[in-house]
Amino acid sequence: MGPSCCLAVLTDATGLWLRPTPIPGPGPALLVREGSGRGPDRGTVPARGQRTAAARRAALLRSLWRTAGDGGKSLSLGVLSLCVLSLGVLLLAAAAPEAAGSPPSCEAVRKVFQLRQLGPLRGIPESPRAGVDLQVCTSKNPTCCTKKMEERYQAAAKQDVEQVLQTSSATLKFLISRNAAAFQETFEMLIRLAENYTSTLFCNAYRNMAAEATARVQEFFTDVGLFIFGTDISTEESVNRFFDTLFPVIYNHVINPGLTDISLEYAECLRMARRDIKPFGNIPRKAIGQMGRSLLPSRTFLQALNLGIEVINTTDHLHFSKDCSRALLRMQYCPHCQGLTLSKPCMGYCLNIMRGCLANIAEVDLHWRGYIQSLEELSSAMSGTYDIEHVLLNFHSLVNDALVQAHINGPELSEQVNKVCGPPVRKPMQSPGCSLDQNKDNQGLKMFSRDSEEALANRRKEFISQLWLYRAFYGGLADQLCGNELAAADGLPCWNGDDVVRSYTHRVVGSGIKAQSANPEVKVKGTDPAISQIIDKLKHVIQLLQGKSFPKYDKWDHQQTGSGGGVDEQISGDCDDEDGCRGSGNGEVKRVLKITDYIVDFGITGELI
């Protein structure tokens, strides 16, 4: 078999018409692809029984080896080599993509559009067309986009940025919301614990009046909880109301006990006279000061954490202006219209667009830094007399001191009461005794103590140290999004809004609204009302955190029981003689009872009747 035979074999196996092409030097002609006589120029054979490219290649190899196996009689080694070389050329041509002259396709664009679930495929061009109706993704070249696709791309671009915003803030939001819930739960448990300690005091030391007294205790700590969690009530009024309602109970069972209880009318007279008679000395005033110093900062701390969550929710769902939406579309999806579905924007181009779109968010940066700084300062100050744990868990000690003082001054108080309310009027019934299930309640409270591995102050300190890492979050948000999510890596070809280039050549502007006047990609007009509102809230809570809306109390001396050290009206109202501000009893220093303590020291072990 000679070269003509090899030509026939190649033609038969590949379905291609070949022509001999002379090459310099001795030897046979080189075979070059001429086209298929069995179908279109694309090299496909639409006729019935057409074999695939792989089948043709296999048949060709079998033919060549059959010919070579003829002992060299029909085909010399040189001719076989030529056939194999020619076959390689043909196979490379068959494996190559469609010829450059083939019509371009929008298939890649359609696939991405479908994968992103941006809408139905009907109406999407199968091949590029003139984009005369496009408003943003305009190009001199044919495009794979329609006006309807452009609208869907614009909505997708805004959604994409919202998603990366929410992803970037997710850890911060979780940090604040988790700790807000944890602190609220801790405060709730502290209130229950303090209420139990105080009720247990009456059950252990004043059992005959425990039922009446524990009802007053429950009312008081209900007010404490309402105040800490945001209800607009006065801590001063709550403390005064507690001691007002406690006085008739103490008078009936400690100061002037009788066989039966005093009448309701007489009890009301005693309640009204408590602030004039001052049976508890300076204790109510001391309790007002301590509650004011601890409850309001704790309430403000919780409010600040909830505001932090609100700030993040607001910035996560930012309203994008029309100009920003068009810029996001141009950056994210306009390259798709030219078939560049894998391209990413240049870093400088991305920064200009994101700094323009997030210009209002960047204005939050200064106030966010102040917010975290003020939270840290308040957290540090919430120790000692500011420590809610100390104040609540030692409230029973103040109550105990008040009862002891009333018992000691009993005869004098009886004379004062007789002058104001007359001799006691009693009713023919006796108060029930203690009904508190101490074993059940104490077990639950002890379990809480064991599970509390850290003191409240340490928990606050740990939270603030974690939050401090996010103090520059809003100032560098645009840079973070471009660097981590949106832009192409340095040195790689990238999209500049018009074409794929090596680098972005326009000026890159800074962050904030003022810097956007020179932004070549986005025009920023005015401030976002939602962002302005959240900034105002941050300013207000910073004032609260810094103590500008409540007093900077002096450190309270546990042995100080005389007058001095005014209490701001917002916390405790005007302090006058009726509030017992002139009292000067000898206060007893009680040990600080922390959550991790298991034993309650009530100071009194026997009943006073």
Image (cartoon, grey):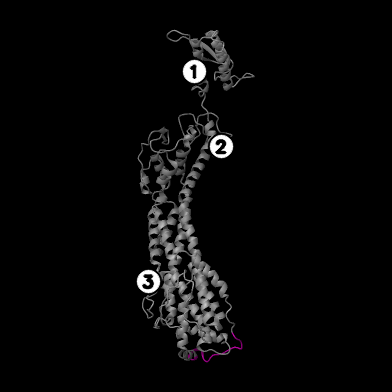
Residue bearing the label numbered 2: 114
Which one is in front in this view, the residue at disc 1 or the one at disc 2? 1
Q: Which residues are magenta?
A: 418-430
Element at label 3: loop
Disc 2 + disc 3, Cβ < 8 Å: no
Q: Are there few (<14), some (14-19), or many (20+) residues within 10 Å of tag 2?
A: few
Splitting the image into 4 quarters, where does residue 124 fall? top right
Q: CA distance from mark 1 to mark 2?
A: 38 Å
Q: Position of residue 153 (x, y in %)?
A: 51, 39
- Which residue is identified by label 1? 89
Q: Amino acid at mark 2?
A: Gln
**Any mark on residue 553, and which?**
3
**What secondary structure is found at the residue carrying circle 2?**
helix
The numbered disc on residue 119 is none
Q: Position of residue 96 (x, y in %)?
A: 50, 23
Q: Position of residue 47 (x, y in %)?
A: 62, 18
